[in-house]
């Protein structure tokens, strides 16, 4: 079976690997190539379905198809070999995410690796953390509503607590597993070493009644905890509760990687299965118990104390800074250290104070998405409506901001300008209310700001886990409302982006109407013969008046196609014709007929007369690059027009300012089917004056 024209074009252009990007305008495919020298131009020019092939500056290349260019483009993009080829189509969320994070990558390699290490250590367990946070929220809600009793002797409540506490208690083992895997170490080995510190035997070392003088305990008044030290092998070992700790497994996995890969270099392959885990467990297990564990606890506690001091002594700065920083930290993947600190605060202080201000940012983010949803419904933008509904649901119900960020916000940079005001406003509210109405934590201490005893994804479902819930609720509501209001009133798109969306929606609506009309049209009754009377009454259809001339669509000076400077039109690949350098902004139909093509960008129109003459009106040279900016379309595809009817109004000053020629081309694209097509160039004309003579 012969290859399709689409496949042949890609082969002649140098293969899919030679294509950087592919777009199309009203008549031609526009390639950006890796190496234009690989193009087989002769093959393209003699290929059936191709009207011409024109090299451009650099490695750009144009293949002239004519009116069927859109369908040819679709055929090419559906070829299997084109699946991974870059195009000018909208990037996926993953591509937006990668592009945004690339902005902070590459300058300091070790820092890049560090943040990737943190991210990959936490990312696989986000699902269970989210599930546990929702369970916590529902339990707190049911207790506050009196649905279940909150006393400690409620066995049902204890069982439910075990479900979510299992996640946070054994979190160090999960983190150790992921961190080890990231560093190409047997993840079960990392998890096993961390599990050692959480066994009943290790916990029993702090029992002073059992071990007597071998264990010394001192109360830590700053954190409200008791620190114990046991003598093991004649050396002091600081004992800590490692449940919920995340710094220790991260540090342990890094040391384990050094030991593990070092042992693999010196131990023969035949016995590595036994002796690499054996020596790793002994060496890293001892190092973790004596050095890494206590150091990790000290680092985590120290950072928690510093932030707690800041929250207590500069609560305004803290409560406002967190919501304003998060919109920049999350896209770059730099928020993981703060997430680790939240977990550490809960483990060491018994509560966390970062998640309240963080929730303000999240709801400002969701408010911006809600504003986008409102506008998409108003503008009948089906594509953005689907995107924003999914992103808003993920945010409000799951507390996940990534779908909003990568699906919408980073694509339309004006969103950030609106959203940051919402973040700042919500931050001020939580700072003021948090100062005026401090919360009391379990230890009895008074804390400025909103606190929580659980690691919770900040969604609607997790509002009940926050102490001073009403303060938190008002703050996130303000952040949400301000962001949404600013997006709705000021929009999230530039005027050009908005015009492009409205033009696309209008075209889709017109296409839908035409399809509906076609579907509703009665089918011809082919089987039934007409009644004699009716047959006698029928008059033969009048033949269409032959088209003898094509008139100027505007006032101006007529030039030849060669004078336009466009190699494709000058080659007559799209037929014989002329160009008019316009002196007025309105472009009108040069013939009567049906609009077969109306470019979404408003720069090109294809009209077919009743007697089969196909005329192309192309406004300006390369003006497809303007994406409709400056073009106001007055017609739609499938519409019938008469010569002199308005097609479009064009801001030619804007076209000139953008660096494009205003020459408006009128070409008879099926010239080869005509007896003769004679251009009438070299004169000044007004709208409606003949510029092309046609003979059938």
Image (spheres, grey):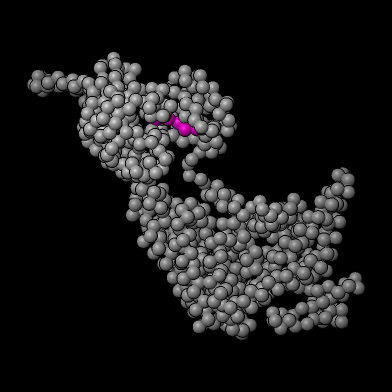
Q: Is 642 positioned to the left or the right of 276 in the image?
A: left
What quarter of the picture does the C terminus occupy? top left
Residue 336 placement (x, y as % from top left): 63, 62
Q: Is 163 positioned to the left or the right of 677 in the image?
A: right
Q: With respect to residue 240, does 187 lie above or below?
A: above
Residue 319 quadrant: bottom right
Q: Is 383 positioned to the left or the right of 96 in the image?
A: left
**Picture residue at 35% right of the left edge, 33% below the top:** 663
Q: Is residue 357 magenta?
A: no
Instruction: Looking at this view, name the residue that lies furthest to the top.
Output: 675
Q: Is residue 29 magenta?
A: yes
| Front residue (pair 499, 215) | 499
Q: Which residues are magenta?
A: 27-31
**Picture residue at 85% right of the left edge, 52% below the top:** 263
Instruction: Looking at this view, name the residue that lies furthest to the front.
Output: 683
Residue 588 seen from this side: yes
Residue 348 placement (x, y as % from top left): 68, 74
Residue 180 quadrant: bottom right
| Front residue (pair 214, 413) | 413
How many labels sit on residues? 0
Instruction: Looking at this view, name the residue that lies furthest to the right.
Output: 234
| Front residue (pair 173, 574) | 574
Residue 635 seen from this side: no
Residue 69 placement (x, y as % from top left): 41, 30
Q: Is 293 positioned to the left or the right of 95 in the image?
A: right
**Picture residue at 59% right of the left edge, 56% below the top:** 332
**Picture residue at 60% right of the left edge, 51% below the top:** 102
């Amino acid at each position: 079976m012969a290859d399709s024209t689409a496949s042949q074009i890609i082969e002649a252009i140098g293969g899919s690997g030679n294509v950087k990007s592919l777009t199309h305008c009203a008549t031609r495919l526009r390639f950006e190539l890796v190496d234009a020298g690989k193009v087989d131009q002769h093959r393209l020019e003699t290929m059936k379905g191709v009207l011409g092939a024109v090299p451009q500056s650099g490695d750009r290349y144009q293949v002239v198809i004519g009116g069927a260019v859109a369908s040819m483009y679709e055929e090419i993009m559906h070829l299997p070999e084109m699946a991974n080829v870059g195009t000018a189509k909208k990037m996926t969320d993953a591509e937006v995410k990668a592009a945004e994070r690339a902005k902070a990558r590459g300058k300091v390699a070790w820092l890049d690796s560090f943040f990737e290490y943190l991210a990959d250590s936490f990312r696989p367990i986000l699902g269970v953390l989210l599930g546990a946070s929702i369970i916590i929220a529902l339990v707190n809600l049911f207790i506050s509503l009196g649905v279940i009793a909150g006393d400690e002797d409620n066995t049902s409540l204890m069982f439910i607590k075990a479900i979510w506490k299992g996640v946070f208690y054994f979190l160090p083992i999960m983190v150790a597993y992921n961190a080890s895997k990231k560093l190409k170490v047997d993840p079960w080995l990392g998890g096993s070493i961390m599990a050692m510190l959480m066994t009943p035997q290790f916990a029993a070392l702090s029992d002073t009644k059992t071990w007597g003088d071998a264990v010394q305990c001192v109360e830590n008044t700053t954190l409200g905890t008791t620190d114990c030290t046991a003598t093991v092998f004649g050396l002091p070992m600081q004992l800590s509760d490692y449940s919920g700790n995340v710094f220790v497994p991260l540090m342990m996995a890094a040391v384990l990687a050094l030991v593990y890969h070092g042992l693999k270099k010196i131990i023969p392959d035949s016995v590595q299965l036994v002796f690499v885990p054996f020596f790793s467990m002994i060496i890293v297990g001892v190092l973790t118990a004596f050095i890494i564990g206590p150091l990790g606890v000290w680092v985590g506690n120290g950072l928690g104390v510093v932030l707690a001091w800041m929250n207590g002594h500069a609560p305004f700065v803290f409560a406002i800074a967190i919501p304003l920083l998060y919109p920049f930290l999350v896209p770059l993947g730099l928020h993981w250290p703060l997430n680790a600190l939240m977990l550490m605060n809960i483990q060491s202080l018994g509560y966390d104070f970062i998640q309240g201000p963080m929730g303000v940012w999240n709801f400002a983010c969701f408010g911006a998405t809600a504003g986008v949803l409102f506008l998409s419904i108003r503008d009948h933008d089906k594509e953005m409506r689907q995107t924003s509904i999914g992103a808003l649901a993920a945010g409000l119900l799951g507390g996940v901001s990534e779908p909003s960020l990568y699906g919408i916000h980073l694509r339309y940079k004006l969103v950030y300008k609106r959203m940051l005001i919402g973040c700042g406003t919500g931050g001020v509210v939580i700072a003021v209310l948090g100062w005026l109405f401090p919360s009391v934590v379990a230890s009895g201490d008074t804390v400025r700001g909103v606190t929580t005893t659980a690691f919770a994804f900040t969604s609607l479902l997790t509002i009940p886990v926050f102490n001073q819930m009403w303060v938190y609720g008002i703050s996130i509501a303000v952040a949400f409302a301000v962001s949404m209001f600013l997006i709705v009133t000021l929009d999230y798109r530039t005027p050009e982006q908005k015009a492009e969306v409205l033009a696309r929606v209008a075209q889709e609506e017109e296409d839908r109407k035409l399809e509906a009309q076609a579907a509703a049209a009665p089918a011809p009754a082919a089987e039934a013969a007409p009644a004699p009377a009716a047959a006698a009454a029928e008059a033969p259809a009048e033949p269409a008046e032959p088209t003898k001339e094509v008139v100027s669509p505007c006032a101006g000076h007529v030039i030849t196609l060669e004078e336009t400077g466009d190699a494709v039109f000058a080659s007559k690949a799209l037929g014989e014709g002329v160009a008019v350098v316009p002196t007025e902004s309105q472009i009108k139909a040069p013939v009567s007929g049906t609009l077969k093509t109306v470019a979404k960008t408003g720069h090109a129109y294809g009209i077919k007369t009743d007697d089969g003459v196909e005329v192309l009106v192309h406004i300006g040279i390369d003006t497809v690059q303007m994406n409709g900016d400056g073009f106001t379309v007055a017609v739609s595809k499938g519409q019938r027009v008469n010569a002199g009817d308005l097609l479009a109004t064009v801001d030619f000053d804007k076209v000139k300012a953008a660096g494009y020629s205003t020459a408006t081309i009128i070409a008879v694209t099926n010239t080869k089917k005509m007896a003769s097509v004679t251009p009438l160039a070299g004169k000044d004309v007004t709208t409606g004056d003949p510029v092309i003579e046609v003979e059938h």
